[in-house]
């Protein structure tokens, strides 16, 4: 199982845990579902099983180099800039060269 943590930086430059989810798979549909409900609980309006307007969309969304999370962010948070964490990219780089 994977633990997903959503952390935000407030106006005092302090980190705030705003959402957490424990999931048993890391497919795109799971991440899309979670991101849709983050919009809904932050003021989005839901009509006929889809969110049509509102909700708080982050300016920047930092993720590990998981392509399914990146696809979900692009689909749900359309005006959001996604960044990949350099630490996780470095870990993948090291892991890929350890096999040689």
Image (cartoon, rainbow, N blue to C red):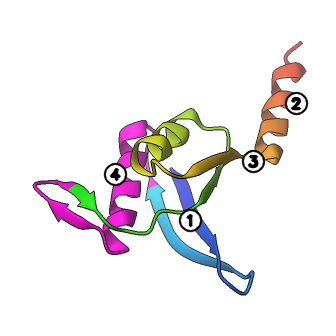
Above or below, 24 against 93 in this view is: below
Residue farthest to the top?
100
Q: Which one is in front, 63 or 2?
A: 63
Image location of residue 96, percent across then percent down: 81, 22
> Closer to the N terminus: mark 2 or mark 4?
4
Reply above or below: 88 against 49: above
How far apart marks 4 and 1 lie (CA) works out to: 14 Å
Is 96 or 64 nearer to us in this picture?
64
Left or right of residue 94, residue 52 in this image: left
Q: Which residue is mark 4?
A: 33
Screen quadrant of the C terminus: top right
User: Which region shows up in magenta?
Assistant: 23-50
Rendered residue at 48%/42% (across/down): 74
Whether residues under marks 2 and 1 lie with C-beta atoms below 8 angstroms apart, the answer is no
| Kind of element beneath mark 4 | helix
Q: Is residue 89 above or below residue 50?
A: above
Query: Which of the 4 image quadrants contains residue 84?
Result: top right
Front position among marks 2 and 4: 4
Disc number placed over residue 6 in the picture, else none? 1
Q: Residue furthest bottom?
A: 12
48 magenta-colored: yes
In the displayed structure image, the side of residue 37 where residue 9 appears, left or right: right
Q: What residue is disc 2 on?
A: 94
Q: Is 56 on the left-hand or right-hand side of 96?
A: left
């Amino acid at each position: 199982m994977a633990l997903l943590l959503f952390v935000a930086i407030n106006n005092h430059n302090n980190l705030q845990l705003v959402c957490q989810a424990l999931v048993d798979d890391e497919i795109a549909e799971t991440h899309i579902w979670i991101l849709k409900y983050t919009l809904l609980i932050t003021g989005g309006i839901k009509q006929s099983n889809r969110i049509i307007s509102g909700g708080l969309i982050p300016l920047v969304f930092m993720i590990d180099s998981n392509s399914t999370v990146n696809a979900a962010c692009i689909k749900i948070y359309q005006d959001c800039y996604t960044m990949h964490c350099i630490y996780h990219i470095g870990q993948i780089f090291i892991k890929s060269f350890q096999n040689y």
